[in-house]
Image: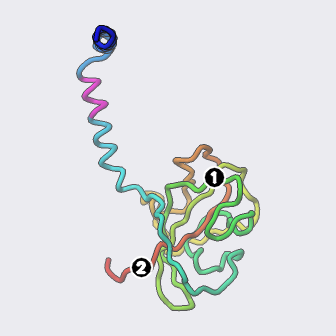
Amino acid sequence: MKIIDSAFAWLDRTMDRSSRMMARRTSRRSVLAKLGTAIAGTALLPLLPVARAFAAEGLAETGDPRSCDYWRYCALDGTLCSCCGGTHTSCPPGAEPSPITWVGTCRNPVDDKDYLISYNDCCGKDVCARCNCHNTEREKPVYFPSKAGAVLWCFGTESRSYHCTVAVVLGEASAEG
């Protein structure tokens, strides 16, 4: 029992010293400002265009994923991963997809339906110099960055160096707003 009591006494002394040191170095205002910033930042997280884990399975498609004219690339501004060792839906080895994306709406010529396309930049390798596309169909200006392809989206990755871009179908676009 004495061992437990002495462990708690040591913990109590350590916490007391730590809290007194923190009180000497910080003010109430700075603590409240940091707390307010954290709360506001957390509230804004759902607004980020974060990569979605689902994709349309069994979608009938036609065209060459190594061509800028491929239907999924209607709003893609970047280098095609399908020309750089990856596919139109996966990054090449050594590159990681950014969890932050931009989204476009493209029409599939096979079924004549509109689909939401998530454009993910693959990061961590030098830029691939093949198959550079600049498609801006339905693109919004840069002041609306979640719909602008001209921004490098290598945030949330170990390296912020851009390599190429993939186009993942999220699902059919609804006719509502």
Horizontal side of residue 61 vs 6, given as left or right = right
Q: Nearer the viewer, residue 78 or 111?
A: 111
Counting labels gives 2
Residue drawn at point x = 54 percent, y = 83 percent: 59
Q: Which residues are magenta?
A: 29-35
Question: Which residue carries the number 1 mark?
Answer: 123
Residue, far front: 1
67 vs 89, left or right, is right
Which quadrant does the N terminus fall into? top left
* 127 with respect to 144 (left or right): right
At x 68% / y 65%, what residue is drawn? Answer: 81
Whole-percent x and y of residue 177? Answer: 32, 77
- Amino acid under label 1? Cys
Task: Identify the element where label 2 is drawn.
Answer: loop
- Which element is circle 1 on? strand
Where residue 66 appears, as percent x and y from the top left, is: 71, 74
Name the residue that disc number 2 marks.
Answer: 173
Contact check, label 2 and label 1, Cβ < 8 Å: no
Q: Is residue 19 above or below residue 108?
A: above
Secondary structure mostly seen in the magenta stretch: helix
Dot 1, how many residues are within 10 Å of its Cα: few (below 14), some (14-19), or many (20+)? many
Amino acid of disc 2? Ala
Q: Quadrant of residue 60?
A: bottom right
Residue 75 lies, in percent from the top left, at: 55, 71
Task: Specify few, some or many for label 2: CA neighbours under 10 Å numbering under 14, 14-19, or 20 or more.
Answer: some
Mark found first going from the N terminus, 2 or 1: 1
**Residue 165 location in percent, x, y?**
62, 63
Query: At 48% from the left edge and 76% from the top edge, which residue is drawn?
Result: 105
Mark 2–mark 1 Cα distance, whole angstroms, equals 28 Å
- Checking the image for residue 81, the label placed there is none
